[in-house]
Image: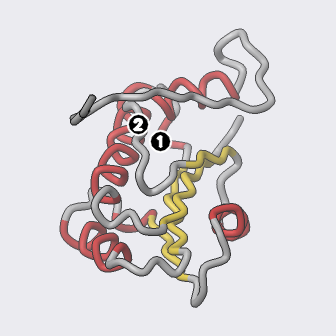
Amino acid sequence: MINSLAVIVPVYGCERFIQKTLESIESSIDFFYQNYSNSAAISAEIVIVNDASPDNVEGVVDEFIQLKSSYKSIYKVVSHSKSLGAGAARNIGVKLSTGEILFFCDGDDLFLKEHIYVCYKALSREIPIQPEVTSINSIAVVKTKTKI
């Protein structure tokens, strides 16, 4: 049985979006814990890697964790002193995490609330598929302005 999961969130220049991102991750963790029968035995963590972002993303993350998070104790936050790129930030997140299953969510992306639950069931072979890597992409147009 898989006993732990981690969500790795590299952040750079996403101050405007990071709160919604973290809310969506926490919502997905909530859904997992409410709907998975053995969820009490499974630990979760969220690893945020600030890739020397020039905006106030770190301040927004800290404020969210302290004032709005339902899961203060599962966060790990690390900051680079200079930008190394998204790949390096993800790799640092992997090294810092203890999760047996790793999820990646960029700082300006959102998780669907069922995301962790469905992927966990698939990866623990409770759904009859055998993926080695999963990728779920979706696009939602929130507001557009088009000039012709």
Q: Secondary structure at mark 2?
A: helix
Q: Residue at x 42, y 81 (%)?
A: 54
| Label drawn at residue 40 | 1
Name the quadrant of the C terminus. Answer: top left
- Residue with the most extreme front position: 148
Q: Residue at x 70, y 48 (%)?
A: 100
Q: Amino acid at mark 2?
A: Tyr
| Label drawn at residue 33 | 2
Q: Do labels 1 and 2 touch, CB within 8 Å?
A: yes
Q: Amino acid at mark 1?
A: Ala
Query: Disc 1 vs disc 2: which is toward the camera?
Result: 2
Q: Residue at x 57, y 57 (%)?
A: 8
What is the tally of numbered marks visible in this picture?
2
Callout 1 environment at 10 Å: few (<14), some (14 to 19), or many (20+)? Answer: few
- Residue with the most extreme bottom position: 81
Is residue 1 toward the left or the right of residue 142 in the image? right
**Residue 75 position by quadrant:** bottom left
- Residue 6: % across, % down: 58, 52
- Residue 21: % across, % down: 36, 51
Q: How far apart, in angstroms, are the residues tagged by discs 1 and 2?
A: 7 Å
